[in-house]
Amino acid sequence: MARSLAIKDEHAEQRIFRARALIVSLVAIALMGVLVLRMVQLQVWKHDFYQTRSDNNRIQIQPMAPPRGLIYDRNGVLLADNRPVFSLEIVRERVGDSAEDLDRFIEEIRAVVPVSDNEVAEFEKRLKRRRRPFEPVALKGSLTEEEIAVLAVDRYRFPGMEINAQLARHYPFGELFAHSVGSVRRINEEDLRKLDPVVYSGTRYMGKRGVEQYYETSLHGEVGYQHVETDAHGRIRQVLDILPPVSGQNISLSLDSRLQIAASGALGDRRGAIVALDVRSGGILAMVSHPGYDPNLFVGGISPADYRHLITSRDTPLFNRAVNGQYAPGSTFKPIMGLAGIVHGQTNWERQVEDHGWFRLPEQERIYRDWSWKKDNSGGQGVVDLHRAIYRSSNVYFYDLASKLTIQQIDDFAAQFGIGQVTSVDVASASPGLLPDPVWKRRMKGEAWYPGDNVNMGIGQGDLLVTPLQLATAANVIANRGRWVRPSLLLASDGQLVELVENEPSPPIPDVSGPTPDDWERIVDAMEAVVHRNKGYQQDGTAWAYIGRDIGYRMAGKSGTAQVVEIRQGEEYGEEELDEYNRNHAWFIAFAPADDPSIAVCVLVENGGGGSSVAGPVAREVIDAYLLPQLAAR
Amino acid sequence: MSDFIRHMPQRGSLRAREQLVRIHLDPFLLAMLLVVMVYGLVVLYSALDRNAGVFNAQVVRLALALVVLLIAAQVQPRTYLRWAPVAYVVGLGLLVAVLIFGVTVNGSKRWIDIPGLMRFQPSELMKIAVPMMVAWYLHERVLPPSFRDLLVSLAIIALPVALIVIQPDLGTGILILAAGLAVILLGGIRWRLIAYAGIAIAVAAPGLWYTLQDYQRQRIVTSFDPESDPLGAGWNIIQSTTAIGSGGLFGKGLFQGTQSHLDFLPEAQTDFVFAVIGEELGFVGVVALLVLYLVILMRGLWVASKAPNTFGRLLAGALTLVFFVYVFVNIAMVAGLLPVVGVPLPLVSYGGTSAITLLAGFGIIMSIRTHRTW
């Protein structure tokens, strides 16, 4: 201590300090200079960059989904509307940092409203996707009124929970129009590649079946935008600018919901399809495919269990039989065959054929049987002309006739009725059926066209395939005596008969050429006899016993029974011996009133059995439901 | 008569200054501090979204801190010299106590809770006690300090710094380290030794990296590349530079900052309040503040160099430099030049503790300036 005191030089130390203070000041000034330079860099040189960045932070462009156009039936009954649905969403950042906090939060919510494990799994998947901080993530969609009420009461317990409303499609009739009006479904990755990302920026669902699919562009409307100022939590502080969305077009369909209900009821639990057309306009009055499904399931996002059930069911409820079901037409094809024979001079209204129940081509073993054939080679319809061949549905007459025509003649004539092509204006994804010819057979089966192929086509079997919509259309052509109108679903748009973008004017189909007006009347007469002729055993029309006894108007019809499996030579068809799904399909086509038709109907009952006995009464019920109120009003 | 009128105001202001000096205040330094505080309050009022309740609490805190300054200025410098070892030892004891009895807030033990009375951070006390202790030690020694004296000084600094860093509170640790080193620097440590120390730190840096906590490493990484984790650790820096940069030359105007008022800028009232100045008042507002801080620094160093003995010089100089380190570390951090450390902007950031410590320091500086008797 004493030593240091002795040498301590107060003046020297003060000099040292002043030198140091000076250096420190200079360093401090230099450091301040660094800060000022940094500020110049941020605030002057890169100001524009940070200005943009700050604006991007706060200004969000939010797409506003347009309300989807409503769909009405021909009487103004709503078939598809939009309803607010409420979903429970979670702001992850407000729930706590750890995974345990989130789990506990979800468990507490589950104690209040039911949330399935699947919904939790989906939520966690959505949570992993890229999103803005504080952007809410949906946990549970379509809350019920009760759940909303319960959650509202407990809201204070769940600070990170939000209940948000969106407009969602709703189908008030559920299953009834599932296959005709169709449904919207969630837009998936594949759709996104095809869709215009701007137009669909606010939309989560799009029409994927039926009318919803076909008129997607018009129903969708135009997306709107709002520029909003949001805070860091994603909450909107103010709306800066709005370009409102333009809602989709409302459209009215030719469908008649009362007739649809009647048709669906007539079919009952059976698998099958019904198409009813307004004869003069071609408007589709009813289009039913059974079994159906509830399209509303797809709107909220269908659960995997429900979906698995729908796609694995042997009854294929998602399959639209009316439009995509392709079946052999069976005997319903006979009126077209008959007219083909007359037009090509291979038969006339007087020519008679003896029908003993079987037919054989010259120099061939194979026997082609009538439906009334027995093992002892009895059966048959006796002496038949074309009129009787229709009302008794003689196979032998048409075997004989088909063997006299060339396949080209048959195909060309049948094509005039829309067989083998899509003639509908606006039915989404309609199937064309199949009108086989030698070229097709060579390509698909590697075989030549045999005379026996003609014979089978004579009764609507073989490789010939039609959809119920096509057969209804063919019946409509006959009802119109050869005059064509395309089948269509659209009646009007926003109350006016305007063309929508989807409807490129389809070229008119030329009327059927060949048959004289007399031929048309005679073929319709024969089809009337199917329903009305009552002359005793083996003299009645095939359908009289089932639908003709008490009918109050004139109906023309034709039954058909299409084989599903081939019956071996020498064997009879025994329904009870066959598996249900191998039994014959029952067809019936009809229109009424016969002399001035207003409705044409096609009924298919899959594996239903006999056309007249099974499909006939269904067709009668549908036409009754349509005509009787009109007749009573008169 | 005309003479009288001409001289009256001068005389009046002279009298006011004399009165301030008589109660041991430095009028110029006080005026500068008040200007910064008022400027800070205006900005803070905006950063608080004009929340009058919270704002008033801050006004009360600053008033309290001014009272502390007034008291600290009345104490004679020799009293500080005499009590320096006591304050240091008591501070060390409290730091040990914190580690044992401390209250854990946000994962670190920094607080001592005296139930029903108060809660305080012993590390705040050390911001003054450590430079005071080093100054006390060197006061009796021959300057420039010998190597042995240097080692003792470093030990005086290292002990509390270590205790604070393990709390963990890196920001305060750095400030106290800076305070102690400032004394040694001003005491005349040879440049050669500083160069050696610099080389040693450069060599040891990779090893130091492994002693850091994960979150501290993360801060360092993201401060140099905030875009690597834009929604996580980089968020603060991205938002603060965006706020400053978008302010431009003249700013968006008071209360008009979108980054702060829409909550994009975190800690807008506390550690990141400088970004609010940059956004709302622009380059002009920022430079004005920097100039004020620089003037305070110069005044502090001037006071120090006028002090009559080693203790006074070293203590006043060190306290001034700590204030500057606060300023530089905070602004460089907010501007994205340094990693994020919890250092507030002196006299502007919301909160009372740092303001009280800082103004207590300035009280001591004023005491050194105004007391002639030792």
Image (cartoon, rainbow, N blue to C red):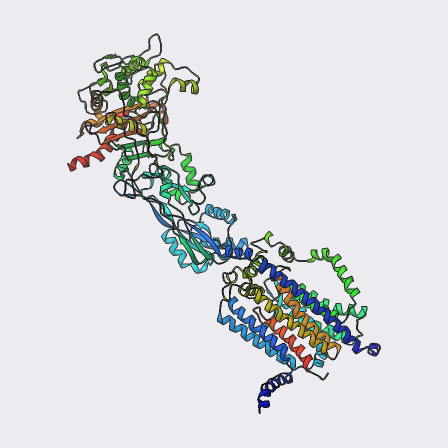
The residue furthest front is B2
Hey, which quadrant is residue A553 in on the image? Answer: top left
Q: Position of residue A237 (x, y in %)?
A: 45, 59
Viewer-closest of A130 and A487: A487
- Asked if A301 appears above or below B98 in the picture, the reply is above
Q: Position of residue A455 (x, y in %)?
A: 33, 15
Q: Position of residue B351 (x, y in %)?
A: 57, 70
Viewer-closest of A470 and A16: A16
Residue lying at 21% horizontally and 14% vertically, measured from the top left: A350
Residue A364 seen anywhere in this rendered image of the structure: yes
- Asked if B314 appears above or below A473 in the picture, the reply is below
Q: Which image quadrant: the N terminus of chain B?
A: bottom right
The residue furthest left is A634
The residue furthest bottom is B1
Viewer-closest of A428 and B96: A428
Give the tally of numbered discs. 0
Residue B86 seen anywhere in this rendered image of the structure: no
Hey, which quadrant is residue A612 in on the image? Answer: top left
Q: Which image quadrant: the C terminus of chain B?
A: bottom right
Q: Position of residue B317 (x, y in %)?
A: 70, 73
Viewer-closest of A308 and A221: A221
- Asked if A237 appears above or below B143 in the picture, the reply is above
Hey, which quadrant is residue A45 in on the image? Answer: bottom right
Is A209 displayed left or right of A10 in the figure? left
